[in-house]
Amino acid sequence: MNTNGIPCVDTLRKTSSLLRKDVLEMIYDVKDGHPGPAYSAAEIITALYFGGVLNVRPDNPAWEYRDRFVLSKGHACPLLYAALMRRGFFSEKEKYSLRKINSRLQGHPDMVKTPGIDATTGPLGNGLAMGVGMAWALKHQKKKSRVFVLAGDGEMQEGIVWEALQVAAKYSLDNLYIFIDHNKRQSGGQVSEVSGILPLMEKFEAFRLWCREIDGHDFSEIFSALRDSEAEERPSVIICNTVKGKGIDYMEDDNSWHKRVPTEEEFLSGMRQLEETDQ
């Protein structure tokens, strides 16, 4: 990770608010989407794309030696689209094409359609498995590129996740960095009530992975975990404690916003709140 050019925390915080505004505008315009899961991951995505972490080239999205990013929780893609747009992978005019026919910004990431998307995701758990495959292939090709995966805590219930982690551990994929968006809620309710997957830390450690649990909305903790993980010769898992819907008071920790469209009044209120934090 290049830590020399990391912007100040205030700049990153403003960027995360800007991305949240983009998401709210996109979802309100098309009247469809998942704001809650997007907002819980805003600081993670901001840190990766605007904090000097990901080595990518917006003018050459298919650059052979780029770092790869996989959004395993693909339904949160409006946030990723906002980040790619703000990094210059495509024009801001495409923002309002979300989920529309023939758009490059579909309801789940599509690596064929959208510049900057490295994996087509949607079926939960598959993205993490694809990230493991990418990391193994890059190692096999002796490339220094890294793979970053952002997965939801709900998809830890999928068996394919643990099969993939066995492979990651076996081949000591130290070029693999897995972020778990641990907002503790999924579409069906609280993660703890839907399945007995918790606690997560002990399970990851049993797979001999390097693990750290952090506040997923704290940029200093995100960067500290990444710096420490670089010294490890094994895959890294960073469990990010987050709040679903973070950033707008009426969305925070309210699971009804997993997939929901704001009314005009809610939209205007949300934009005002985000503009206040963007100052």
Image (cartoon, grey):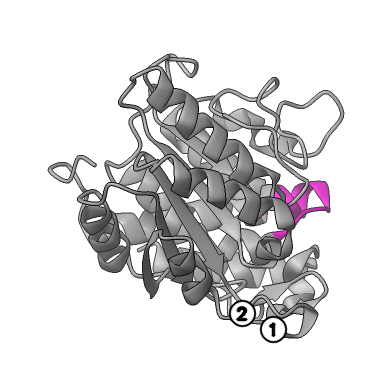
Residue 4, x across and y down, in percent = 12, 43
Residue 70, x across and y down, in percent = 56, 40
Q: Which mark is residue 192?
A: 1
Q: Residue at position x 55%, y 51% from top?
A: 165
Q: Main secondary structure of the magenta part?
A: helix
Range drawn in magenta: 25-34
Query: Do labels 2 and 1 touch, CB within 8 Å?
Result: yes
Q: Is residue 196 left or right of residue 167?
A: right
Q: Residue at position x 66%, y 81% from top?
A: 250
| Three-letter amino acid code at the position of disc 1 | Ser
Distance (Cα) linking label 2 and label 1: 6 Å
Position of the N terminus by quadrant = top left
Asked whether residue 18 is drawn in magenta, I would say no
Q: Is residue 228 above or below residue 206?
A: above
Position of the C terminus by quadrant = bottom left
Res. 17 visible in picture: no
Q: Nearer the viewer, residue 65 or 9?
A: 65
Q: How many tags in the picture?
A: 2
Res. 64 visible in picture: yes
